[in-house]
Amino acid sequence: MSFSTEWLALREPADHAARNKDLLAAIATYFAGRSDLAVTDLASGQGSTLRAVAPHLPPGQSWTLVDYDEALLDSATRLGAGDTVEISTQRADLSDDVASVLALPTDLLTTSAFFDLVSKPWLTQFVKQAAKRKLPVYAALTYDGRMTCAPHDEHNAAAVAAFNRHQRHDKGFGPALGPTAPETAQRLFEAAGYKVMLGPSDWKLGPNDAELQRQLIGGWHDAIAELKEIPAAALAAWHAARLAAIDAGKAELMVGHQDLWAFPA
Ligand SMILES: C[S@@+](CC[C@H](N)C(=O)[O-])C[C@H]1O[C@@H](n2cnc3c(N)ncnc32)[C@H](O)[C@@H]1O
């Protein structure tokens, strides 16, 4: 799956506003007083997690951003995260090369908007490798299947259900965990001896987020159309009604996410 720099830039402010503040505070406390922290950010995109987390960690950090998209890694380096953070990048396909990435010297593993793309076998292996090295893990903004749209439309519920089914399709790692990812991750980390904190990081989008809403609805429309479950006319009516509400400044959208902070007990 590929993600454009424009899309990741558009969602970054909403992601930063949504990130669970209790979890960020817990991470800050865990690493307080440490120096020379090394962080590895998996599926980094152009560095949203780096910019969200670095201010909560002691100065003098070095981050390795890992993604298979060279353009996103280049953009991440350009955007940076201030003078006190050293950034390097590593291009890797995490679907078949997670072990070598986890072998990098690191104090913390981070990721965001990623665990819902992976499969249960992949996440099981990931947790096993992280546990072997006793590495704490922060995984933010994992979609949890909750989504509500206002104003009411008769097709909203069918559209959300179809989108959630599409989320389980293979995104390059085998059948995706989709909305089951937060709960699955919690169970796997706890079984591996981690203490786990899970907290909501929902997007609550309104008239000021018109372009983000437009793009989301467009993406969901295309995903749902691929399934061919909802009659084309009904899907088109839902799409048109959502866009009209956005244009009229009346659309609200809640997208449920969970953040996870897991550290060896
Ligand atoms: C939804 S984006 C999230 C990006 C970033 N973490 C953020 O929150 O803005 C998912 C990221 O996963 C990366 N990705 C997807 N499949 C991958 C794979 N097999 N190996 C490495 N990166 C992958 C994409 O390139 C993209 O940057």
Image (tube, rainbow, N blue to C red):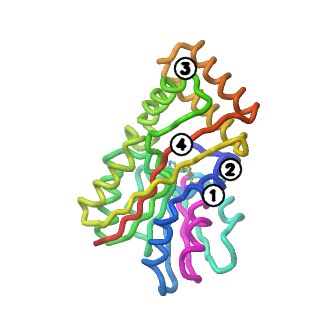
Determine contact: label 2, label 1, CB under 8 Å.
yes
Q: Is mark 4 within 8 Å of ligand 1?
A: no
What crowding class fits label 1: few (fewer than 14 Cα within 10 Å), some (14-19), or many (20 or more)?
many
Tag 2: amino acid:
Thr
Q: Nearer the viewer, mark 1 or mark 3?
A: 3
Q: Earlier in the sequence, mark 2 or mark 1?
A: 2
What crowding class fits label 3: few (fewer than 14 Cα within 10 Å), some (14-19), or many (20 or more)?
few
Rendered residue at 63%/17% (across/down):
237
Q: Is mark 3 within 8 Å of ligand 1?
A: no
Q: Which mark is residue 154?
A: 3
Q: Earlier in the sequence, mark 4 or mark 3?
A: 3
Tag 1: amino acid:
Gln
Which secondary structure, mark 2? helix
Residue 154 position in % (x across, y down): 55, 20
Task: State the residue position of label 2.
Answer: 5
Q: Is residue 48 magenta?
A: yes
Determine contact: label 4, label 3, CB under 8 Å.
no
Residue at mark 2 to residue at mark 3: CA–CA distance: 34 Å
Q: Which residues are magenta?
A: 46-68
Task: State the residue position of label 4.
Answer: 255
Tag 3: amino acid:
Glu
Q: Which of the 4 image quadrants contains residue 88?
A: bottom right
